[in-house]
Image (cartoon, rainbow, N blue to C red):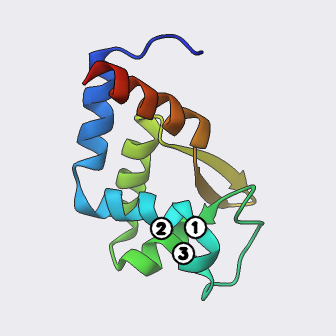
Amino acid sequence: MAAEIDAKVLIEVFKALGNPARLQIMQWLKDPEAHFGAYEPIADRRTVGVCVTHIQAKAGLAQSTVSSYMSTLERAGLVRPTRVGKWTHYRRDEERLAELARAIGTTL
């Protein structure tokens, strides 16, 4: 098991997920094929993630807002970015999410 997750880390995760749009993005990224199938993939969504421009288009938010939201999710350890050419793709960090779920289960 990974190092114990402290309260400070959990607070950052809860803050990141406390925003409805960021929570929605995390839900969409759980099944990228179902939620982003209407967008032509630049790379494999399962292994590389979803292009930030597709997240922006689906969310209907400004590019700067989506970039800020994705940075917040990344800092909280919830998503991982991957560059493909000039595009940044994001996917959920499922291993980290499982660690966080265990920490919440034992801490709360």
Q: State the CA–CA distance, disc 2 to disc 3.
A: 11 Å
Q: Eyeballing the image, is 101 above or below 50?
A: above
Q: Are marks 3 and 1 in contact (CB under 8 Å)?
A: no
| Mark linked to residue 54 | 3
Using the numbered discs, state the Cα–Cα distance from disc 2 to disc 1 in whole angstroms.
6 Å
**Residue type, label 3:** His
The local secondary structure at tag 1 comes to loop
Q: Please, what is the three-letter code of the amino acid marked with disc 2?
A: Trp
Q: Amino acid at mark 1?
A: Asp
How far from the left and from the top, in percent, is residue 27? 43, 62
Q: Residue at x 53, y 72 (%)?
A: 53
- The C terminus lies in quadrant: top left
Depth-wise, is mark 2 or mark 3 nearer the camera? Answer: 2
Residue at the spot 50% in from the left edge and 28% down from the top edge: 99
Above or below, 75 relative to 29: above
Q: Earlier in the sequence, mark 3 or mark 1?
A: 1
